[in-house]
Image (cartoon, helix red, strand yellow):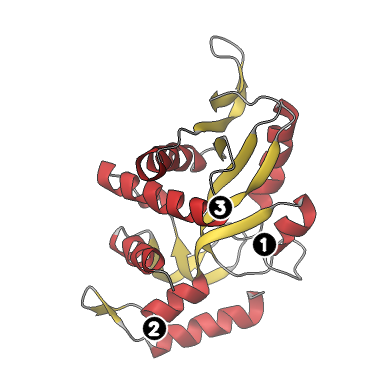
Amino acid sequence: MKQYKQEFIEFMVDCNVLKFGQFTLKSGRQSPFFMNAGAYVTGSQLRKLGQYYAHAIHDNFGDDFDVLFGPAYKGIPLSVAAAIGYSELYGKEVRYCSNRKEIKDHGDVGILLGSSLKDGDRVVIIEDVTTSGKSIEEVYPIIKSQADVEIKGLMVSLNRMEKGLEGRMSALDEIRKKYGFEARAIVTMGEVIEHLYNKPCRGQVYIDDKLKAEIDKYYEMYGA
């Protein structure tokens, strides 16, 4: 596993973004782990987060894109942070763009925040985590209705490795099949388990035998 991936896993734990216990997800599933990007709240955290996204985007998509699109609401700060991180690490200026939940009819009118989209733009979508793929189903038609753009791919911070909406393959694989673009993650839940299982992180073991058994049971039901 690459060094930045190991560091990112510990960063999520340090920021209380990745938590372990019992959680009810938006999908209704009862999960022994939960990831909440809304817990990145300080300037230094957001700066480091943007750099992790930039590193993963560069690894997976290179420099062949123009816009980072973050779906409302959590995707808004993610796209901003990643655009800053990309400028800092790779010296490339990319634009950020997000959607509004409601169309604005005065001043800066329309459905978009940040940069507008124009024909020929190459877009990377940024999300925090994709459990079922529902958010992409909502935002994809918005993006495509604004201009004749090419979506290069989707980057999420954590691949939960669960069945998507159709219930046969992972959400990221469903997105690849349905929309025809790549869907990648900074880290997968498999990599998280590999790095944290019975290994101390900051003096604490986060995934012990008991929690590992609960995660295994969860994946027996929902794993892809």
Amino acid marked by disc 1: Ala
Question: Which residue has dot 1 on it?
Answer: 171
Local SS, label 1: helix
Residue 197 numbered tag: 2
Viewer-proximal residue among 182 and 72: 182
Residue occupying image coordinates x 38% and y 49%: 51
Residue 86 rendering spot, x and y as whole percentages:
42, 42
Local SS, label 2: loop
Residue 201 numbered tag: none
Viewer-proximal residue among 199 and 151: 151
Q: Is residue 177 left or right of residue 51?
A: right
Label pair 3/2, CB-CB below 8 angstroms: no
Amino acid marked by disc 2: Tyr
The crowd level at tag 2 (other Cα within 10 Å; few <14, some 14-19, many 20+) is some
Amino acid marked by disc 3: Met
Residue 77 rendering spot, x and y as whole percentages:
43, 39
Outermost residue to the bottom: 209
Q: Is residue 108 left or right of residue 212?
A: right
Question: In the figure, 21 relative to 210: above or below?
Answer: above
- Whole-angstrom CA distance, mark 1 to mark 3, is 13 Å
Residue 155 numbered tag: 3
Tag count: 3
- Whole-angstrom CA distance, mark 1 to mark 2, is 24 Å
Residue 24 rendering spot, x and y as whole percentages:
52, 64
